[in-house]
Image (cartoon, rainbow, N blue to C red):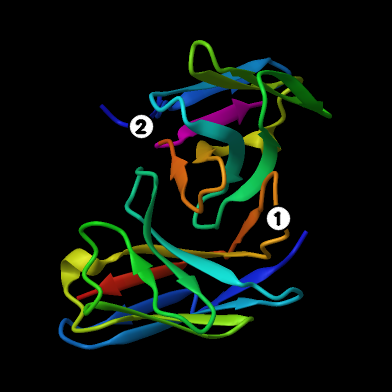
Amino acid sequence: GAVVSQHPSRVICKSGTSVKIECRSLDFQATTMFWYRQFPKQSLMLMATSNEGSKATYEQGVEKDKFLINHASLTLSTLTVTSAHPEDSSFYICSARQNRGPPYNEQFFGPGTRLTVL
Amino acid sequence: QKEVEQDPGPLSVPEGAIVSLNCTYSNSAFQYFMWYRQYSRKGPELLMYTYSSGNKEDGRFTAQVDKSSKYISLFIRDSQPSDSATYLCAIQAGGGNKLTFGTGTQLKVEL
């Protein structure tokens, strides 16, 4: 299957700093990338959907000014958590999709990035 | 009411047992049904997907969808310790982007 990487795998930062997480599709072009957040023992919650070259679409309740998403190329999307606070500590997972058409476009998930804000 | 309900477990079974994992959903517009496996501190990996009622088999795994009851299941035969993971159901409306995940069921297969 297709491979999606994330970097870094783990990051610890101080409250008030900004953190950038990269998501790359290694062997395919991803027209659409998704960013999820997962708290311990909870499910994945979609934060935003990004299409290459256009602005991201954020889910209700997700602050677009706090979680900046850039999808500048077909193989790279970045999530920047600005002015991070302890409540932003979570497991952030991206996925990428090829948009091959119906009936189903599989999303390939990255390994996740664990963010800890002190 | 959540769009997708899944018993979080944990579920503990002996090696070789048949495991049954289930989800219910509320929106009849959902058309595509997926099961993902997630190991600790890793991203989810797709196990199976189906878009119609009935059964779909892949090795030791069988996915079952009952649209009339809005109920989906994943069966694992001859379970192995390596099957120990969290299993997430995910559902998608036709043509839509968004995957709606269940909370995941934590499975432990013991020797």
User: Identity of the amino acid at label 2?
Assistant: Glu
Residues shaded magenta: B103-111
Task: Give A56 or B40, whichever is nearer the viewer.
Answer: A56
Q: Helix or strand or loop: what does disc 2 sit on? A: loop
Q: Is residue A41 left or right of residue A28?
A: left
Residue underneath mark 1: A101
Residue B3 is marked as: 2
At mark 1, the secondary structure is loop
Residue B30 against residue A110 in the figure, above or below: above
Q: Chain of mark 2?
A: B
Image height of B34 relative to A46, above or below = above
Q: Is residue B60 visible?
A: no
Question: Does residue B110 belong to the magenta stretch?
Answer: yes
Q: Name the residue rendered at 27%, 87% in the picture.
A: A18
Front residue of B25/A17: it is B25
| Same subunit, tags 1 and 2 | no
Distance (Cα) linking label 1 and label 2? 25 Å
At a point 18% along the width and 84% down the height, the residue shown is A83
Q: Nearer the viewer, residue A64 or B16?
A: A64
Provide residue A16's location: percent of width, then percent of height: 15, 85
